[in-house]
Image (cartoon, rainbow, N blue to C red):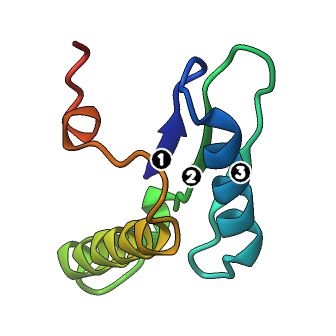
Amino acid sequence: MQIPVEPKAAERPAIVKAMRTFSEASKAPRKWDWDFAGGDDWEKIQCTRKLEEFLATGNQVAAITKWLEELLDDAAAFRKQNPKLPWSVRAAEGDDK
């Protein structure tokens, strides 16, 4: 899962700061890595796992479902910790207008 910020976002400095703070506070097993591109590139925080980790479990569907639910909880926590950021439903849905 990734949470990106557009290079031309009006509040980019505040968003990047929030992303960095969130990633620095995260701990295993759901460590959110901050991908600082700098310049005019997209920046993001992301949390990933290898598919092999899920395949090694007895119930892959349950393991993946649990992982996705935990990531959504993390995303909700990030939003709750940063209520002043410009949260937009349209942006979340990919509306490019």
Q: CA distance from mark 3 to mark 2?
A: 7 Å
Q: Image point 60% across, 20% down: which residue?
A: 7
Query: Where's residue 82, x and y in %?
Result: 51, 65
Element class at badge 2: strand
Q: Which residue is mark 3?
A: 34
Q: Nearer the viewer, residue 14 or 49?
A: 14
Q: Is residue 97 above or below residue 9?
A: above
Q: Nearer the viewer, residue 89 or 65?
A: 89
Q: Image point 69% across, 64% down: which residue?
A: 23
User: What type is the residue that disc 2 sits on?
Assistant: Gln
Q: In the figure, residue 76 lies in which quadrant?
A: bottom left
Q: Is residue 31 above or below residue 28?
A: above
Query: Quadrant where the C terminus lies?
Result: top left
Query: Where's residue 61, x and y in %?
Result: 19, 73
Count residues near mark 1 (Cα–Cα under 10 Å), then give few for <14, some for 14-19, many for 20+: some
User: What type is the residue that disc 3 sits on?
Assistant: Trp
- Is residue 37 found left or right of 86 in the rendered image? right
Element class at badge 1: strand
Q: Which residue is mark 1?
A: 2
Element class at badge 3: strand
- Is residue 65 found left or right of 82 in the rendered image? left
Q: CA distance from mark 1 to mark 3?
A: 10 Å
Tag 3 and tag 2, C-beta contact below 8 Å: no
Q: Which mark is residue 46?
A: 2
Q: Which mark is residue 54?
A: none
Count residues near mark 2 (Cα–Cα under 10 Å), then give few for <14, some for 14-19, many for 20+: some
Tag 1 and tag 2, C-beta contact below 8 Å: yes
Count residues near mark 3 (Cα–Cα under 10 Å), then give few for <14, some for 14-19, many for 20+: many
Q: Is residue 96 above or below residue 28?
A: above
Q: Image point 55% across, 27% down: which residue?
A: 10
